[in-house]
Image (cartoon, rainbow, N blue to C red):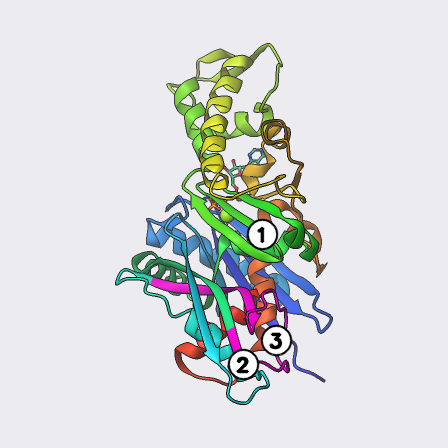
Amino acid sequence: MPKRQLMLALDVGTTKVSALVAEAKPDGELAVLGIAATPVVGMRRGLVFEVERVALAIRDAANRANSMAGSDLAQAAVAINGDHLTITPGQAKISLKSGVIRDEDVRSVLARAAHVDLGSEREMVRVIRRGIAVDGFRGVADPQGMVAHTLEADVFVVSGLSTVIRNLRHVVSMAGFSVASLVPAPEASATAVLTADERQVGVVHLDVGGGTTGISVYRGGHLEYFGVIPLGGESITSDLSVGLGVVPTQAERLKLEHAAVGSEREGTLEVRAVSGQSVKLIPIKELQDIVAARVDEWTDYVEQHLQRIEWTKGPSAGVVMTGGGALLKGLGSHLEERWGWPVRLGTPFGLGGLSDLSRSPGYATVVGVAKAGAQQAQTREPESGWRRAVQFWVNLWK
Ligand SMILES: Nc1ncnc2c1ncn2[C@@H]1O[C@H](COP(=O)(O)OP(=O)(O)OP(=O)(O)O)[C@@H](O)[C@H]1O
Ligand SMILES: [Mg+2]
């Protein structure tokens, strides 16, 4: 019997740690065998601030996912998030002696293109293949076997601050697990929910988390833009807590139950004041105004990123949102109205097994990490050193 390919994926988010144990099926589908999420304190805007508390949450989520699956996996593919993640373009061109493009030539040109200067404080997280040109002809999907004099490659190198990466590895190891690979969270979520057609015709992906929003734009089948802003659903909760004078848990509940962008609902809500048992009445309009102010600020930030891209008619496949923050009522129609582009919630696809929970937009990141792991397993080859690391990511994300 062939060996089963089981993997553990982790997403250490600002508000929750998600863990998923999945089996990569030969047909490319992912069977979800275990899935769990544990609320976390000790993360801020995607970064680890309190190691012990975060490690406890990781251990809890990963152990529960492992026990649901009946597995004991100790190595994990882990999502990395935060506005320290950036992309640097890289290019390379090689002359071909043999005339026919071999697999080694493709590897070699991609590895050279990925050799960009990141400075002393940053390290490479992964390499995204953007385009291959054969004798100057761009957009070649699979150059292997073609006859040519030159081969060129364009890549994006995703890098992050070394200190942040070190701390993420450290907290995962404190929890009793080791990091097999790191996957940028926005890319992972995009992998979980975007179709090849959407990437081809043009799509904006927003991963709206608790403390961050990842922005990715795909066009012509490739990533065209990538950025993370340090703002998510938690800011709305803390604004409501301060603005309405209620404790954060109550503010969160009010947000989930009553907040709706663009709502004209009237009336009052009865809530307990921070100071104790006294009950106070809050006009719903006051709550909606606080939400609207933060959503406006968030939209401005996202727009600043999207303005860096030249649009003629906007993204043909519109905007796809993932993350818990994307579930804020009215957010989709607010963006549709403001941008004039269709907006939908992204649902992870290509899943079997315990897929109901994992199909929620809030699990897109951990599902995407597992999908990336499955692709890695298919493309892993015996090579060594940094070249293998580069090749791994190139294969993973092409
Ligand atoms: N139904 C809902 N309506 C509004 N907001 C929601 C809803 N459900 C979840 N959220 C918000 O989503 C946020 C959490 O989303 P998610 O789980 O994607 O974040 P995370 O991955 O922990 O954080 P990050 O990706 O920023 O590190 C919280 O702020 C939460 O209040
Ligand atoms: Mg997240």
- In the rendered image, residue 137 lying in the magenta stretch gets the answer yes
Q: Residue at x 58, y 45 (%)?
A: 204
Give the image location of residue 246, x and y in percent.
43, 22
Residue topped by disc 1 = 218
Residue picked out by circle 3: 143
x and y percentages locating residue 102 in the rendered image = 57, 84
> Magenta includes 370?
no
Viewer-nearest residue: 183 or 336: 336
**What range is drawn magenta here?**
123-151
Confirm or reject: label 1 Cβ below 8 Å from ligand 2: no
State the CA–CA distance, disc 1 to disc 3: 22 Å
Which dot marks residue 149?
Answer: 2
Quarter of the image with the N terminus is bottom right
**Separation (CA) of disc 2 from disc 1:** 30 Å
Q: Are marks 1 and 3 in contact (CB under 8 Å)?
A: no
Q: CA distance from mark 3 to mark 2?
A: 12 Å
Report the side of 311 relative to 241 (left or right). right
Which callout, 1 or 3, points at the residue further toward the start of the chain?
Answer: 3
Q: Is residue 73 visible?
A: no
Q: Position of residue 194 (x, y in %)?
A: 65, 52
* Disc 1 residue type (three-letter): Tyr
Quadrant position of residue 258: top right
Compared to residue 303, the image places residue 387 above or below, namely below
Whichever of callouts 2 and 1 sits on the residue coming sooner in the sequence is 2
